[in-house]
Amino acid sequence: DALLPRPLQRALHRLSLRLIGQPEARLPFARAFHAAYPRLASRYVRGAGTAEDTALSFSVQLFTAPSVVVALATDGLLPMLLAALRDALDAAAGGPWPRRVVECVRAPLRHNRYSPILRDIEYVLAIGNVAAAAALAGDIR
């Protein structure tokens, strides 16, 4: 949504916040957000949008809700977030394969573009038993 005109972007954000606030719409919205997250995060890490206008800001309303996180955990929420973090680090890496090195001077790290992903991992891991369940299931690689 960072590429949309600002008035449309703000209207969509307001509508999305209303949907998140509706109990019957929260989980379907969360599932759609989960599906779109890798693309949203990848674009944000690579410079699309700002911290104020990224759709990633919806995660606080979703990933801090135990019922939503438990439902999404069965859909691979934590592995998806870890893959998004891996993608962010890859965006900051340089050099030829297989010996790529994360370079701290690259924009994703220099401008903290990975921060929303780390924050979301923290939210998810703070929900009771999510970390233990993921570790026992072998979802963390």
Image (spheres, rainbow, N blue to C red):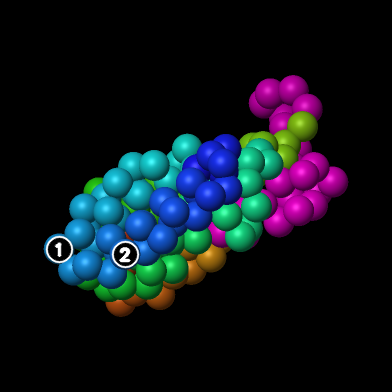
| Residue type, mark 1 in image | Glu
Residue 67 horizontal/vertical position (percent): 22, 70
Snapshot quadrant of residue 27: bottom left
Element at label 2: helix
Q: Main secondary structure of the magenta part?
A: loop
Whole-Å distance between the Cαs marked 1 and 2? 11 Å
Element at label 1: helix
Q: Which residue is mark 1?
A: 24
Q: Was residue 122 drawn as part of the magenta stretch in this picture?
A: no
Which residue lies at the image location 76% right of the left edge and 53% below the top edge? 111
Position of 1 compared to 79: left or right?
right
Residue contact between numbered discs 1 and 2, judged by CB atoms under 8 Å: no
Q: Which residue is mark 2?
A: 18
**Mark nearer the viewer, 1 or 2:** 2
| Front in this rendered view, residue 61 or 121 | 61
Q: Which residue lies most toward the right here? A: 105
| Residue type, mark 2 in image | Arg
Q: Was residue 106 drawn as part of the magenta stretch in this picture?
A: yes
Magenta region, residue range:
95-117
| Front in this rendered view, residue 42 or 101 | 42
114 vs 132: above or below: above
Which residue lies at the image location 27% right of the left edge and 54% below the top edge? 29
Snapshot quadrant of residue 18: bottom left
